[in-house]
Image: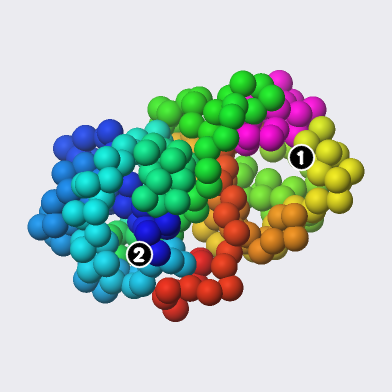
Amino acid sequence: MKKSIIAAASAVIVSTAAFADTPKGVAVAEMASLFKDFDKVQAAATMAPDLIQHNQAVPNGAAVLIDLIPTLKESGISATTHRLISEGNMVVAHNEYKNAKVFGGDHLAAFDVFRIEDGKVAEHWDNLTPVTAPNPSGRTQFDGTTLVTDLDKTAENKAVVTSFVYDVLHGKAPDKITDYVSTETYLQHNSGVADGLDGLGAALKAMADAGLSMTYSDTHMIIAEGNFVFTASEGEFSGDHVAFYDLFRVDGGKIVEHWDVIQTISEQSANDSGKF
């Protein structure tokens, strides 16, 4: 269970005051209580007692996370939130964890998703993966643009990514990829893929040549704020049943940057909530 609890609430460098009384503020306060302040009272105040947990290694309810706080404090874990977006009562945090051996890895990348109700975290989803070396273009799983802009284009940008996911990733009309992804600027943060459509094509060819497959079958969440759009999908990767968590940045009506975390979906779970 310890390996995955980290993603339930990550330490952040974001100031809670910057988002006071908003869904972002609640999520930031919850993460800070568990991974920065190590404050059981604050944690209890920011989580619903019957919190619905989709991390497969963690039971439902807030108590298990609150009880873990002393262990977290002793572990010396360091965590950073690089990107934070929200739409309605949904919040997405792009997180990095160092010295996280207590959770199964010294250096981890994750996306955490929170549903906020009545001023508390009511539901949580996550994906975790080990951090690897920079990709062929020298990009890491965390660097790149962080600033949320173009708030007036949220709906437009969400529509672009939604169409890309269903046409290209789901394979409905893959030839339409240049309708959605910029042919001039496409910055890639996936560990094995270089920048540009050429880099993506080369990576897909290498996978095919190695007999590896990647299929998106269902997309369960699409959350957007300004120039950022997050999607949570289910599918198959190299023969494994996986969850694909993708974050896209849109500029000028085209996807220009991408981050992702892929995690295998276990056949066993400590809760009955399901991965999605």
Is 260 situated left or right of 69 in this image?
A: right
Q: Report x, y in % for residue 185.
A: 66, 22
Three-letter amino acid code at the position of disc 1? Ile
Three-letter amino acid code at the position of disc 2? Glu
Q: Is residue 72 above or below residue 142?
A: below
Residue nearest the observer in this picture, 63 or 163:
63
As drawn, which residue projects farthest toward the bottom? 272
Residue nearest the observer in this picture, 43 or 23:
43
As drawn, which residue projects farthest toward the left? 41
Residue nearest the observer in this picture, 227 or 205:
205
Q: Is residue 196 part of the magenta span, yes or no?
A: yes
Q: Which residue is mark 2?
A: 123
Q: Which residue is mark 1?
A: 177
Residue drawn at 38 percent across, 44 percent down: 100
Is 148 situated left or right of 167 in this image?
A: left
Label total for image? 2
Q: Report x, y in % for residue 156.
A: 55, 41
* SS at circle 2: strand
Q: Is residue 2 above or below residue 142?
A: below
Examine the rendering and report whether any part of residue 120 can be seen: no
Residue drawn at 55 percent across, 50 percent down: 245
Is 102 situated left or right of 150 in this image?
A: left
Residue drawn at 14 percent across, 57 percent down: 40
Residue drawn at 37 percent across, 59 percent down: 2
Q: Give the magenta part as a residue range.
A: 181-200
How far apart in space, not on screen, are marks 1 and 2 (Cα)?
34 Å
Other residues around mark 2 within 10 Å, as few (<14) / some (14–19) / many (≥20) = many
Other residues around mark 1 within 10 Å, as few (<14) / some (14–19) / many (≥20) = some
Q: Report x, y in % for residue 203.
A: 78, 36
Dominant secondary-structure state across the stretch colored magenta: loop
